[in-house]
Amino acid sequence: MNPADTSRPQLKTRRINLDTGRENVVLISRRSKALRPEVFRGFSRVELRCGPKVLLATLLITDDDTLVGPDDVGLAEPAFRRFSEPVGSFVTVTPAASPRSLDAVRAKIQGHTLSATEISAIVDDLTHYRYSDMEIAAFLISSASFMTSDELLALTHAMAQAGTQLTWDKPIVVDKHCIGGIPGNRTSMIVVPIVAAHGLTIPKTSSRAITSPAGTADTMEMLARVDLGVEQMKEVVRACHGCLVWGGHVNLSPADDILISVERPLSVDTREQMVASIMSKKLAAGSTHLLIDLPVGPAAKLTSAMEAMRLRKLFEFVGDHFGISVEVVTTDGRQPIGRGIGPVLEAQDVMAVLANDPEAPPDLREKSLRLAAHLLEYDPGLRGGTGYARARDLLESGAALKQMQRIMTPREPRSVTPASEF
Amino acid sequence: MNPADTSRPQLKTRRINLDTGRENVVLISRRSKALRPEVFRGFSRVELRCGPKVLLATLLITDDDTLVGPDDVGLAEPAFRRFSEPVGSFVTVTPAASPRSLDAVRAKIQGHTLSATEISAIVDDLTHYRYSDMEIAAFLISSASFMTSDELLALTHAMAQAGTQLTWDKPIVVDKHCIGGIPGNRTSMIVVPIVAAHGLTIPKTSSRAITSPAGTADTMEMLARVDLGVEQMKEVVRACHGCLVWGGHVNLSPADDILISVERPLSVDTREQMVASIMSKKLAAGSTHLLIDLPVGPAAKLTSAMEAMRLRKLFEFVGDHFGISVEVVTTDGRQPIGRGIGPVLEAQDVMAVLANDPEAPPDLREKSLRLAAHLLEYDPGLRGGTGYARARDLLESGAALKQMQRIMTPREPRSVTPASEF
């Protein structure tokens, strides 16, 4: 690109070895010709442009020429990867206009109800990293106080549309989801192999830890690769009927990961956001039948049957709207499940159950069997009421363990991008 | 300090030439012995400790040893200044617990009303830079939807208490404040010299631009130093009855500046926050009589007389509670005031009015005279109804210009800390 293309001063990109997490960060010299001190301050938001390509980032300023010279702009690692232009490209740097959809957030703050178009614009800006942390927080908190049913549906739909949308060539695609909050609750790793051994399709993606010491993806990673891409995931499901992968590389409902990155440090978890988050992922994953596990207990996310019922109704409402058959079970969330807490011990508990080890934690085994039984009943070919017996047979015969071993075998070489970079 | 004092790994501090604005930022090597990858991610919050001293900061991670070695922690400039420990100090770095008062913010998000104690804890954490931008946004938006009268009083009080509290040995200390939003509206720079020339005490602090191209502090800076500290400001007021300084170094209601640093990029400006912000500054400034200018117009902050009335009542309510005699005037905010926009041209307009230049903008002159007239009427020695004539006399006789020249003369050498560092 010719630096004379435009009248604005152009800066040459450099790559700065800085891990700034989800946030895009760029570095400019205080002596930069592009820096207008009345506009730019440390931590203000700027816009990088290179042809049609645009990146919003947080600005750091330095006097240290060894970091960036006055004619350069330094891109910290995540910004560099997302911008994906070679080092030495010419870019303009201007103060960032707020993302346009922020007007809708401001309206929401003032008590207005948002249209599906406005919500979809917000999700689009979120997905493209155009919101800063404070802007994400403003959106989350403004919708925490109230969200109409229509807003909830629009948010779920927009989030599902924003990323990968999986389709499976099967009439029944089952899934289970637990709202989390109970340490050691690693039932998915037992339920998936049982259900897959039966022959039902169960393409399970999981998150890393949000509130507890380990998420299913963290625990599964003790046993097998979880950072599969869409094609690899499809291949595993084709071969084994089920999979257990981390959702991060599959890019289902990417706005959700961005919202969670602010919800987590704020410890703000509202009912509507939770339902939109979960249902958008399931909608994008192509699920037709979904079992939701709501643990209730004094230290769980839900502390009363009344709360659980209100949440159940929201799940049913959204499921019905999008044609997903949703079943919600409330379970005992009064204490941790299994013996160990943390990825290593939880993985041992899971494998002990699958191996029918007499020392295996009976609570984890029993809860998994009951959840698997619910899912198996979705099979029209199974005689009503025999789901539990079938699940137990598949576990006790070793079929579930064998299925788990198949699921654990990746068919592709390990990708070169370590998971920690995302 | 002895690195063997504690069992946690200690890191040696380095200073990193990075301007990160209001945000504290520290840098750690990915190979650091203190870094536990399951806990630390780029942009997560960490806590630095050195003896009793604690600093909360945002973490950046690097593999570049020339920035920080594995045994070091790099402090970006603002973090280094606020921590104020020498380079080479030993510190521990641990994941930051959220500030405790964030529980109150979460309660507010869920619709609870906060106690004075909770609000005071929030203001204390804000003032000590313990809130990240997203946490500040969460607090702002959670109180944007509703704030009770008691919460508003508690917030005003806590904010006033959090910084410098000025006292003046005078029965009457007047002040004026415009809620802003009208370009060119530089009446303070004319009102203050008129009122001070009369002999009333008017210690005026101003902000830099929030929404318009220049704030009074920016415009005044074209003519004189505005970055005075408390003692310098007191000296000018003692000598001249009035001053025109930037509030930044005087540290009145410091939490307000922190809230504004998030309100501004979000463009969120709620009635209650505005009243708490202004009244906390006036309370801390020791004002006894306050005139508030509310411009009303289609592009102003207030677009209708009804809105202005609701805001007026809030100001009167808070003023009455804290014993400040508040008078609110609504003014014509349909267009900019004066000829020029921006600090240089606005300063020219102001000086033209003070010098009785026939080319001086008549709207700026007239509005300033009317506001000054209101303030002069607070003098019990002045015959009722003669405020305007007295203001005009002081302007036309050149007394106001002479007073402005005195106010502009700083008595102390320029401080070594440039304003841009704050």
Image (cartoon, coloured by chain):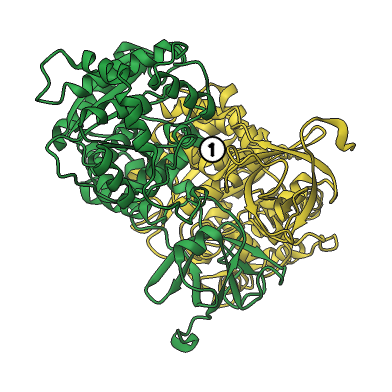
Chain colours: A green, B yellow
Asked if A105 appears above or below A4 in the picture, the reply is above
Q: Is residue B14 left or right of residue A258?
A: right
Q: Is residue B288 visible?
A: no
Residue at point 15%, 12% (across, down): A385
Work out which residue is located at the far right of the displayed protein and give it: B2
Residue at point 37%, 40% (across, down): A245
Number of numbered discs overlaid on the protein picture: 1
Q: Amino acid at mark 1?
A: Ala
Circle 1: is it few (<14), some (14-19), or many (20+) Cα within 10 Å?
many
Q: Position of residue B89 (x, y in %)?
A: 84, 45
Q: Position of residue A401 (x, y in %)?
A: 35, 26
Q: Position of residue A157 (x, y in %)?
A: 22, 44
Residue at point 57%, 24% (across, down): B118
Q: Quadrant of the C terminus of chain B?
A: bottom right
Instruction: Tell me the SS state at disc 1.
Output: helix
Asked if A68 appears above or below A202 in the picture, the reply is below
Q: Quadrant of the N terminus of chain B?
A: top right
Q: Is residue B91 left or right of residue B206?
A: right
Q: Position of residue B392 (x, y in %)?
A: 59, 62
Q: Is residue A199 left or right of residue B15?
A: left
Q: Which residue is mark 1?
A: B276
Asked if B89 appears above or below B188 in the picture, the reply is above
- Observer-nearest residue: B386 or B138? B138
- Observer-nearest residue: A81 or B416? A81
Q: Quadrant of residue B416?
A: bottom right
* Chain letter of disc 1 in the image: B
Q: Is residue B240 visible?
A: yes
Q: Is residue B249 left or right of residue A80?
A: right
Residue at point 20%, 31% (across, down): A199
Q: Quadrant of residue A30?
A: bottom right
- Observer-nearest residue: A115 or B389? A115
